[in-house]
Amino acid sequence: MRLIRFAVPMLLSTKAKNNSQKKERLKLLYAVRNALSGSSFSALSAHPAAVSPSLEAYVAPRGLLQKEIALPFPFDASDTTTESPDKVCLGHLWYLMGANYILGRAKRRGNLVELMKLEQHVRERVEFLMKDVMYYHPDRVDSWVRLGKTMKELYHAATDAFAAVLGRKLRVRAFQWYITKILAMSPERFREKQAQSNLDVFSFQNVVLEWNLFKKMKEWQAKNVDEHKVGSMTSKLKGSNDETEENDAQFETLRSQVSIEEYATIYIFQVIEFARRCFNMAARLAEEAVKKHKLKRQADNGVDKETNTFDKELDDLQNKIIECNEECGLLLFNVLQELSLMKEANLALFPHEMYSRLINDTLAYFRRGWAICESKEDAHEAHFRLQYMIGKTLRKRRWCELRQHERSDPEALSTANEIADSFSKAESARGEGDREHSLVHAFYALQALRIELTISDSSSVLALRLVCRHFYEEEKEADGGEGDDDDSFDSVSTKVVDAQNSTQKDDDGICASPKTAAVRDTKCANAAKKDDILTLLAAADRNDSIRELNVTLARGWLALNIIMALESIPDEDRYFHPSRYVLARIVYWLSTFCSTLEQSGYTCDSIIALVNAVRAHRREEQLQGPSVAAARALKKMAPIFDKRRPQIVAIWFSEYIPTAKRYEELNQRQMKYDYYRLKYWRFYIALLQENAAYGKLKEAGSWVLACKEDHDVIDIMLSVVLRARGQVLRSQFQKMLDTLKGAGGIGGSLPPADATTQTQLHGEDRSVDGLLKQLARTYTYYLEVLHTQRRLASAMDDCRLLLENAKLLMVALFFVGVIKYPSEMMVLEKDAAILDRVFYANITVIKEALHRDELPPRIYDAQGRDAWQTYSCAARSFCEEKWPERLGKGRLFKKSTQPKANAAAVTFVAT
């Protein structure tokens, strides 16, 4: 006991500087605990005094958004205060063991062996800290904070493993089950159901503190991976070799009730709720301590030597309140992000009411932290984090409001205004705090909001005013005088017809531009001034006859301003992926917008000024492809999808997140990362498809196939690129048909029955080579779709339809070649039976089926039997004979067992 009386005060007054010191301290504390086992204090160390029932209920949550348990205030000091100095020292033992316990680091991408160790370490640390707050010091703020952070680590590990191992489809189904079966159940109904089963299998003690989640995931991964790959979502928990679990009736009953994804969801939500309650308790305790400090300071009128120490303690408590409220908000915001997955399944089943409740709770925490943080002038980083997160949460509220279609505010501009203000304040805090220039999250979020309001099909004057209120202006403008404004920017004409001057023609008011010559100057034609755009919008409000044109002009100038804002960030600092996506999105829209203006027939000076300004900003660009807009956007996305580092497929997010960058953890989560790369991937592939860049599409597909990450998101990415390749091939085939039809080849009517040869396209040499090349592409595409059917089944519901479309395209292309070039593309002898009197009619039906997406084509032979399988086998047999080396490209492909004709192929003759 002498050692304890000496060591405990010293350990409480000082903190370990590194993990080595923590290990030494923990070794000492373990020795003390082991020594107590044979002393008179062994009963106290093993079984402390009784715990408060309200506190016990508070730390045993059943799930997220359950009935709120009131904070057990005030604590009864008589139950927790010890008497002798020895007992006082023993009362700090569990806290010190928990504070010096090292969790260690574990990769959160599905390394289940490491995660199993992490789970065990979390339980040990939680056990130490729980004894401290339950039996000795329920008012110790640091213990509650450490409990919250420990469980938060477990939450991050569990939810990332859930995303990486079990996949998105299982998660969506589990969320739907949890919302309908657990959250929708009233507390009374839940207790009634529990009484009927006589088993509290869903208690926090049984779920989180006793069940090995990652061990079960590993067992499921080993035994059910095949079922998961083909889309089975009902795999039940398998038996364990653990003797203790086999003998436990609770777990046996549990295995028969829910699937692993459902139990993992219960586990994760209980961990989230426990961590939130810990941080919430710490915040309330800190608030109580702040009140006591302020009362004490009011009582002490004089100034003593302890004033500075007193102020530091008060500041630390306030920072703790800010931190705990921010942590609570981040936990709930993570839940909002995860529930957003349900939008991909069925928006009609989305839990809007529960989602709105979560949004309100999340905002309440962030705003509670901001209320304290706002008065701290030097807390720039905290200002940035809180305002940034308030803006992100408000953005989710606006998403809900837009789907409610409120007549008073159909565009949810009130919330949009709050979002813009929050992001603007966050960006100001970043600048005032001299943060590194690359951390421009709020800046990009603000520009993304401006883009959303600008490119909306129903953009109102009020929405555009909000966009203009956050107009980007170069820093050099602030250094110059007011008289330099005309030299810095071209002033776009805003002369419009006023109601008081209605005698003039509208066109004169709209199009007058005294500075049209200046627009041609590339140095001055970069953007309109903020006041000019506001004048355009004010005129649109006054005069309905020019509203459409002025709104169009304002949208164009604002889009150009947004591009200038995004391009103002140095290229080397654009590591944050949304920078590329947001810029590419607005570049694509503005290019399409200007093309529409050029084709609209407007000849007034204001439209010409806008188009010329956009052209001057682009400078000279050499673009390839049928879509100029897509080509420009692809250039902006190129740094993400370059050949040297196709990082959107590879894993690029950090394993370990520095404590100082707490806001980064939202983007460094497996689920959020998957969301980002799917969003960017779909946009990138859509641009390639629009630009008919088949080679790039094939290269992108090879990136996915080369990725070794075992995750269903990779399969989703594969399905996206394969579908796009099919659409490009179909478009190319249609162009080929149009060319042949124009050259007098394959037309809408049937060829004559006695036609045995067809001429080549006029002016082309060996045009059959082009058709064969296209058929080789289509055949390769068909094989790739065929080989990946098993992977696609877990990513898309219509994978068989994708395969049938690929087959239809291959068959149609082959038989067009058979008719057009019978001497070069011949049906094999074994398939010559299809060359009957209905052959031409069947080819016409196949082409029409391809045009109408009718699968399978309704074709029949001369005897009235279904002939589609025969025709598809004939096309495939020709391709296998022509390109036998392509069969080896598929890992799961089995070569066709159909017999090949040994004789030479015969020339097609119509019968």
Image: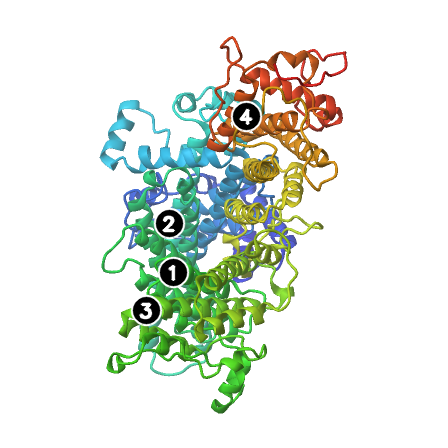
Residue 224 sits above or below residue 562 on the image: above
Going from the N terminus, do you reach mark 4 or mark 1 first?
1
**Given the current orientation, which residue lies at the most extreme top position?**
863
Q: Residue 773 carries which label?
A: none
The residue to which callout 4 is attached is 750
Mark 3: few/some/many CA within 10 Å (<14, 14-19, 20+): some
The residue to which callout 2 is attached is 277
Q: Horizontal and vertical percent for residue 621?
A: 64, 63
| Quadrant in the rendering for residue 507 | bottom left
Mark 4 vs mark 3, foreground winner is 4
Q: Which of 286 and 736 is in front in this view?
A: 736
Q: Which of 581 and 879 is in front in this view?
A: 879
Q: What element carries label 3?
A: helix
Q: In this view, does 784 lie to the left or right of 41?
A: right
The reply to whether dot 4 and dot 3 touch (C-beta < 8 Å) is no
The residue to which callout 1 is attached is 366
Q: Which mark is residue 547?
A: 3
Q: In this view, does 876 lie to the left or right of 401?
A: right
